[in-house]
Image: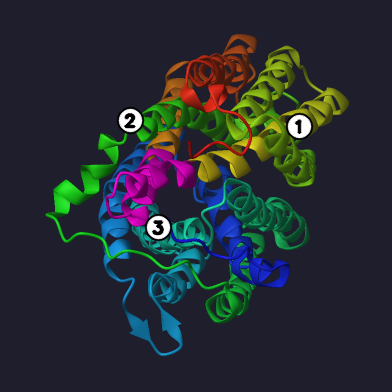
Amino acid sequence: MISAPAPSTWRLLAYSLLAIPLGMAALPIYVHVPKFYSDVMGLNLAAIGGLLLAARAFDAVQDPLLGLWSDRVRGWRWGFVTGRMTMVALAMPLLAIGMVGLFRPPQMAAQMVGWWFIAMLLVVYVAFSLAQISYQAYGAELSNDPFQRTRVTTYREGLGLLGIFLASILPQVLSDAHGARSGFAEFSYLFVPLLLIAGLVTLQASPPPRAFVPAAQDGVFATMLKPFANTRFASLLLIFVFNGIAAAIPATLVLFFVEDVLKRPDMGGIFLVAYFAAGGLGLPLWLALSARIGKGRAWLVGMLVSIVAFMWAFRLEAGDTTPFVIICIMSGLGLGADLALPPSLLADVIDDDEQKGLTRNEGAYFGLWNLVTKLNLALAAGIALPALSMLGYQPRVTTSSQALMYLAGIYALLPCVLKSVAALLLLASPFVRRQPGKELS
């Protein structure tokens, strides 16, 4: 196996800087978009859920193809940008245009809002996936040491959480000052220069990847499906499915829960900040714990922390802000494990191919990984939002205690059930049985 030196801290920070705007783009797509297009643009929940499901299904299908493309451009050069980073450079202007279009929609007839919504979603999804897959695959190539891989993902996800932190508070601050429509438009305008500055630093100063063996030029579908021949990948992906849906449901419903169950829409940004700040501050904990007990075991601890913390949200009532802040902090600590450890485990799993004498296809792996991530979000929005609509819940107007109970149950209890399934699957997997530092054995 070809070794590479540990990336220096400043080079690792340069690589991770792009995660800030990518985090800023990710959070609004699955948290702010449903509420913005419901409250400001007038779309009903069933329409929003259906459009999100359709857009995310398309987005998920494209990811394996983008991953395959990422594997096949590692020999490219575009000015000062080489390899996978050419994909990131191509995506940046498209992502900037899509974010402005999504949150600065022009005045239009009501029947055109849905068409504009899905068109801008597709632009953002294509650009985001184009950047994200190559960006993550590049990170997997920076080291073959298990601890250094967790260090890479910890830096990256830590700065990604900073971007999510900004995206959770800026729209509310700007909306309070200038109104929701203008506030989200200003947020998108701030996003553009930050994306360009962070992207240029990442493109220029990231650590060089370790040497690689060129991927075999097999057929498109054969290459895309090749990761499934890796049994550890299939096991990890199944765990990721249940854990991802468990995280996507409350992310989709949190602002509705805060407004109609807690009756404190003014504190939505504070709750999000508490959650994501706890996730960021907890990242060093998971890095240290994974070095001590192993990545799989540390991830299992993170799942259990999230379950124990979040199950109490179902019992909250109007005005229960302090208990909800505590729940946000505790479940946010569990989020840090979800962010740092699975991508590091995936990088270890990819090494199975190299140990067997096969070519490495990081792009194919991360393409499928992102496909599952998008399907998790699609299912969360495409099922939870229409289901709540059918059960009689309508944002800002529902007063029925039964409908609000359904909202609380889907928001709080269903994710705990799904995460418990993920924890049981992880407990039975080889990742928990492995000793610290032996993930490759």
Residue of label 3 = 129
Measured Cα–Cα span from mark 2 to mark 3? 25 Å
* Residue at image mark 2: 231
Of badges 2 and 1, the one in the foreground is: 2
Q: Front-most of 90 and 364? A: 364
The amino acid marked with disc number 2 is Thr
Q: Does residue 421 show up magenta in the picture?
A: no
Q: What's the magenta region?
A: 346-374
Task: Give the farthest residue toward the right.
Answer: 322
Residue 241 at x, y = what percent?
A: 43, 29
Toward which corner of the image does residue 126 lie, by quadrant? bottom left
Residue displayed at 26% across by 58% down: 68
| C-alpha span from label 3 to label 1 | 28 Å
Task: State which quarter of the image contains the N terminus.
Answer: bottom left
Q: Residues within 10 Å of mark 1 (few under 14, many from 20)?
A: many
Report the magenta stretch's main SS: helix
Foreground disc of the pair 3, 1: 3
- Let me know if residue 280 appears in the view: yes
Q: Which residue is mark 1?
A: 328
Q: Is residue 373 magenta?
A: yes
* Whole-percent x, y for residue 184 in the image: 62, 60
Q: Which mark is residue 417?
A: none
**2 or 3: mark nearer the eye:** 2
Front-lying residue, 346 or 221: 346
Residue 49: x and y in percent read 41, 36
Q: Disc count in the image?
A: 3
Say what amino acid the circle numbered 1 marks: Cys
